Amino acid sequence: MAAGLPVIASNYPLWETIVEGSKCGICVDPLNVQEISDAISYIINHPSDAQKMGCNGQKAVAEKYNWAIEEMKLINVYKGIK
């Protein structure tokens, strides 16, 4: 995501939340070869959509999925353990 590339990820619930929620890629059943192939083909054959997904991924990393954000969450957890 940080590299600005569209993501093809397994359809695990957490990853679906991140990838589909950020509109930065496609989630597929990791055991379904056809779904994986279709996702790759879609990204190759739809370059403008792929570019949008890549930009969305970079934006998600900059705004949500980065250490600065996670650091504050961790500090708040530590503060709550008194």
Image: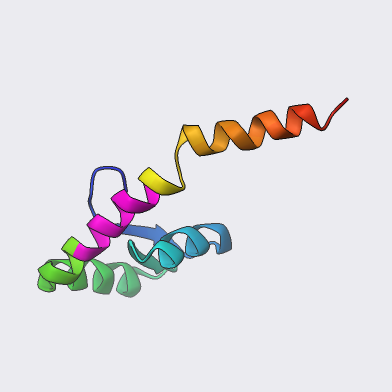
Compared to residue 54, the image places residue 42 above or below, namely: below
Instruction: Decide which of 77, 23 is in the foreground and name it.
Output: 77
Q: Residue at x 46, y 45 (%)?
A: 65
Asked which colour scheme the image uses, the reply is rainbow
Residue 8's spot in the image, x, y percent? 33, 60
| Image quadrant occupied by the C terminus | top right
Q: Residue at x 12, y 69 (%)?
A: 48
* Location of residue 6 (image quadrant): bottom left
Q: Is residue 15 magenta?
A: no
Instruction: Decide which of 54, 8 is in the foreground and name it.
Output: 54
* Location of residue 29 (image quadrant): bottom left
Compared to residue 33, the image places residue 73 above or below, namely: above
Compared to residue 21, the image places residue 3 above or below, namely: above
The residue stretch that appears in magenta: 52-61
User: Is residue 30 shown to the viewer in this render?
Assistant: no
Query: Which residue occupies the extreme right position in the image?
Result: 82
User: From the viewer's perspective, is 13 left or right of 28?
Assistant: right
User: From the viewer's perspective, is 17 left or right of 30?
Assistant: right
Residue 49's spot in the image, x, y percent? 19, 70
Q: Residue at x 24, y 56 (%)?
A: 55
Residue 67's spot in the image, x, y percent? 48, 33
Residue 59's spot in the image, x, y percent? 32, 52
User: Is residue 11 shown to the viewer in this render?
Assistant: yes
User: From the viewer's perspective, is 40 left or right of 46?
Assistant: right
User: From the viewer's perspective, is 71 left or right of 3?
Assistant: right
Q: Total number of numbered labels?
A: 0
Magenta segment's dominant SS is helix
